[in-house]
């Protein structure tokens, strides 16, 4: 069943759990995500990043995501991750995405408000949910790189004003996570999260969640994170699955045999995440 992120995240917020948002690039990843969610009877979010769209094309990724959602026994949202271009956002909506992110975090506050407002206006007109970002999350997510020195934590008072002025449905905040592989153990600023939660009513989103210890994720969810984004950990499972299979079966040429074990490896990782997020049985 294809749904919006707004309805998934409002339920998560009410019941104090989080919905996993997993990045999609091909059919096997989508099947791994849906398979994991169905086994655990959990809602789930399929999200396509700039790199995913460049690799597969909006039409392909949307068609795959919609087919998966319509066939799934659990509620599934199809979301654009880190949208930066107004025209692309419109195209995603036309192609059936039920949710979009407008990432204006690289702009000064007022400009971020202005572009986010514009997206909210057109998306809400057709029942599509909108996520925005305030503060700058470090690391690399496909084409978007934020240097560690440029990463800035979200200011609670700015977050309050931002949500009020834009009317967004959810807000991605910077509290110490980064996209990609961590060098050391990430330290989350829970006090900042608490302060933001106190003044912001919409569900909060955590990016760069691969490699974050499960206790930290659980604590962040208890403090109000309702959507947790995972990409890198799925990539690692995919690569591990393919490499192990090819090492053991160097003469195999059937793509289905090579990708099948990778799909299983990704599914196991995703199931572990869903359990940490507390969304088991919430479908
Ligand atoms: P990771 O690659 O660190 O899991 O981050 C994913 C993400 O936040 C996508 O927006």
Image (cartoon, rainbow, N blue to C red):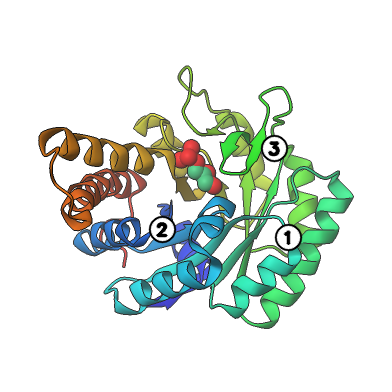
Q: Are marks 1 and 3 in contact (CB under 8 Å)?
A: no
Q: Mark 3 Cα within 10 Å, few/some/many (few <14, many 20+)?
A: many
Q: CA distance from mark 2 to mark 1?
A: 34 Å
Please report whichever mark, 2 or 1, sits nearer to the chain's N-terminal start: 2
Residue at label 3? 136
- Residue in the image at 26% along x and 74% along y: 73
Q: Is residue 216 above or below residue 90?
A: above
Specify whether 180 is left or right of 249.
Answer: right
Q: Are marks 3 and 2 in contact (CB under 8 Å)?
A: no
- Residue in the image at 25% along x and 57% along y: 36
Q: Is residue 153 above or below residue 269?
A: above
Q: Looking at the rendering, in which quadrant would you find the N terminus? A: bottom left
Q: Nearer the viewer, mark 3 or mark 2?
A: 3
The mark found on residue 85 in the picture is: 1
Q: Find residue 97 and report its image quarter.
A: bottom right
Please report whichever mark, 3 or 2, sits nearer to the chain's N-terminal start: 2
Q: Nearer the viewer, residue 182 or 125?
A: 182
Disc 2 C-beta below 8 A from ligand 1: no
Helix, strand or loop at label 2? It is helix
């Amino acid at each position: 069943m294809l749904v919006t992120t707004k309805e998934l995240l409002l339920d998560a917020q009410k019941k104090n759990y989080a919905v996993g948002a997993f990045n999609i690039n091909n059919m096997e990843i989508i099947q791994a995500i849906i398979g994991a969610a169905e086994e655990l009877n959990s809602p789930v979010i399929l999200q396509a990043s700039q790199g995913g769209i460049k690799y597969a094309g909006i039409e392909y990724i949307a068609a795959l995501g919609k087919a998966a959602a319509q066939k799934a026994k659990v509620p599934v949202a199809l979301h654009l991750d880190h949208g930066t271009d107004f025209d692309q956002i419109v195209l995603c909506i036309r192609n059936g995405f039920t949710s979009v992110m407008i990432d204006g975090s690289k702009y000064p506050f007022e400009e971020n408000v202005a572009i986010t407002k514009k997206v909210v206006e057109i998306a809400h007109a057709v029942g599509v949910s909108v996520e925005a970002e305030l503060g700058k999350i470090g690391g690399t997510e496909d084409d978007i790189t934020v240097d560690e020195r440029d990463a800035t934590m979200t200011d609670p008072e700015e977050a309050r004003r931002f949500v009020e002025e834009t009317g967004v449905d959810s807000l991605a905040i910077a509290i110490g996570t980064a996209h990609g592989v961590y060098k050391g153990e990430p330290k989350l600023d829970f006090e900042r999260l608490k302060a933001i939660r106190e003044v912001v009513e919409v569900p909060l989103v955590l990016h760069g969640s691969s490699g974050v210890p499960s206790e930290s994720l659980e604590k962040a969810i208890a403090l109000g994170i309702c959507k947790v984004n995972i990409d890198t950990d799925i990539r690692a499972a995919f690569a591990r699955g393919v490499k192990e299979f090819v090492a053991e079966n160097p003469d195999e040429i059937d793509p289905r045999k090579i990708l099948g074990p990778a799909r299983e490896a990704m599914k196991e990782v995703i199931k572990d995440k869903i359990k940490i997020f507390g969304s088991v049985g919430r479908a």
